[in-house]
Amino acid sequence: MFDRPDAEAVKAYLLDLQDQICETLRKTDGGGDFREDRWERPGGGGGRTRIMQDGGVFERGGINFSHVFGAALPPTASASRPELAGRAFQAMGVSLVVHPRNPYVPTSHMNVRFFMAEKPDADPVWWFGGGFDLTPYYGFEEDVMHWHRTARAACQPFGEEVYPRYKAWCDRYFHLKHRDEPRGVGGLFFDDLSEGGFARSFEVMRSVAEHYLPGYLPIVERRRATPFGERERAFQKVRRGRYVEFNLVYDRGTLFGLQSGGRTESILMSLPPEVSWRYEDRPAPGTPEAELYTRFLVPRDWLAEES
Amino acid sequence: MFDRPDAEAVKAYLLDLQDQICETLRKTDGGGDFREDRWERPGGGGGRTRIMQDGGVFERGGINFSHVFGAALPPTASASRPELAGRAFQAMGVSLVVHPRNPYVPTSHMNVRFFMAEKPDADPVWWFGGGFDLTPYYGFEEDVMHWHRTARAACQPFGEEVYPRYKAWCDRYFHLKHRDEPRGVGGLFFDDLSEGGFARSFEVMRSVAEHYLPGYLPIVERRRATPFGERERAFQKVRRGRYVEFNLVYDRGTLFGLQSGGRTESILMSLPPEVSWRYEDRPAPGTPEAELYTRFLVPRDWLAEES
């Protein structure tokens, strides 16, 4: 009874989270700032889109808060969960993607979300989802290990089995099937979380959200001043093409958003600013570019020696 | 009886078509040449991929011939046509996309294809499909009218109603729903064509294929020497992003190819070489860039005054 889902509390938290992250990224960038667009969804709800373009560090960074609701879930949305059909629903979340200019600084992504469907005289159905993942262009073991250590720390309070489970889920999700290639070096991914009740699930979501910056910022600081040239930039643009392929072909949030009449410019903020496609552009063996594929874009337990 | 479908004849035609088009585009380009990759499909069949990169006119041009077959259509492929379930099948086609470097030269696309499914003691089921469409970055009425006049000429021998029908079909197909925006200025699109028998349907496909170069080359010649700078190039890259969005989110051939284990590099040859995404990058009113949206990317009967 004292563990009833509290959508207002989640919403307040998410709005504050967006503020905090923007403020920190703005300071980190040093030059750029976020433009804000508030928007309304014709069907109910809306959002707060914030985007930085051509910053000092971040070539493009977008953070979106959205809260959408409706009187009845559309049939397509409840096809796989018939118990939700016809219920009033709300979905809210914060989603962010940061594309740095320097190819030695990885791209990062974080998303946390909450869903709830209600009807009179019945318990609400609700769950949390979220995660974060890292997409380097040039691989550094210490960066990836720091990222995964932070991911593990986010999960630690909730049991030893949580990190391996969410890490494996992330690897499965961010996979380009048509290239049999992971999008990056992974991190955490979870969905449908209500186990243990609302308070605990909300805590899991908060812990994931709050470990994103401690995971990412030290990597940004370590690599932001690394000199780079045309070669690194060309490789970064080709690799960014994979990011586009994943988001437009596979990413459920992106496709659902585009198909359900979401705000296109807010959804496609996740796409990188400058991208190339080259036919069979495979790096020569022995180069740092080849090493990204052979040592980093492979299934790997990054913390194997530390557990 | 004398109008039985002849897959071998279609295949011979398509291979020759690929040769002819490559040869003409190579001469037109003046600097670049096509690299050829022959490939086999594990499930049966294969193809001949040809790509030009960094040519004199064509920044990227890909022409693919493929012929795939199998002993039984997979259930997903026959879901909407149960009469095909379990039949041996073959599909063949030529598909090409040309991305010129100069933003005043439009991108063009052409595809023709033939499908046949057979089983013992039954008539084969077969059809043709195809079309071509144009995607300008800067609009010129004379170019678009020439393109549509050529499209109309391709259809003319088969009846007055064919061009308006295939033109409208093209407009419906090449539409970015999430932006409520056409991909370009259209052309022709047809599918499931078997009406009138094999000989006539094959003739329609050939006529469409053979009107592609007469439609496109005069436009290339007219615009290839137009001077351009950073501004035009930036706009071209943003507009190319729409091409990527269409091909990865909507195009049936691309998605079917990626999902069915097709050769990824051959399928994604259609993507442009250098692309940008900018947040809400809307051209200022009164500019040539704005005119593309207001005068060209709108539903329009280009030959209204000529019929």
Image: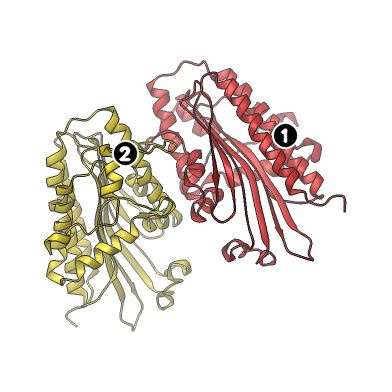
Chain colours: A red, B yellow
Crowding around mark 2 (Cα neighbors within 10 Å: few <14, some 14 to 19, many 20+) is few
Question: Residue A9 lies in what quarter of the image?
Answer: top right
Q: x%, y% of residue A71?
A: 64, 61
Q: Image point 17% across, 48% down: which residue?
A: B141
Q: CA distance from mark 1 to mark 2?
A: 52 Å
Q: x%, y% of residue A158?
A: 80, 40
Crowding around mark 1 (Cα neighbors within 10 Å: few <14, some 14 to 19, many 20+) is many
The residue that disc 1 covers is A152
Query: In the figure, is residue A63 to the left or right of B242?
Result: right
Residue B63 seen in the current view: no
Name the residue type under label 2.
Pro
Q: x%, y% of residue A99?
A: 50, 31
Vertical comparison of B292 with B161: above or below: above
The residue that disc 2 covers is B285
Residue B162 seen in the current view: yes
Vertical comparison of A202 with A236: above or below: below
Q: Secondary structure at mark 2?
A: loop
Q: x%, y% of residue A238?
A: 41, 34
Q: Image point 42% across, 24% down: which residue?
A: A232
Q: Chain of mark 1?
A: A
Front position in the image: B252 or A30? A30
Front position in the image: B153 or A244? B153
- Please identify the residue farthest to the front as the structure is shown: B286
Name the residue type under label 1.
Arg
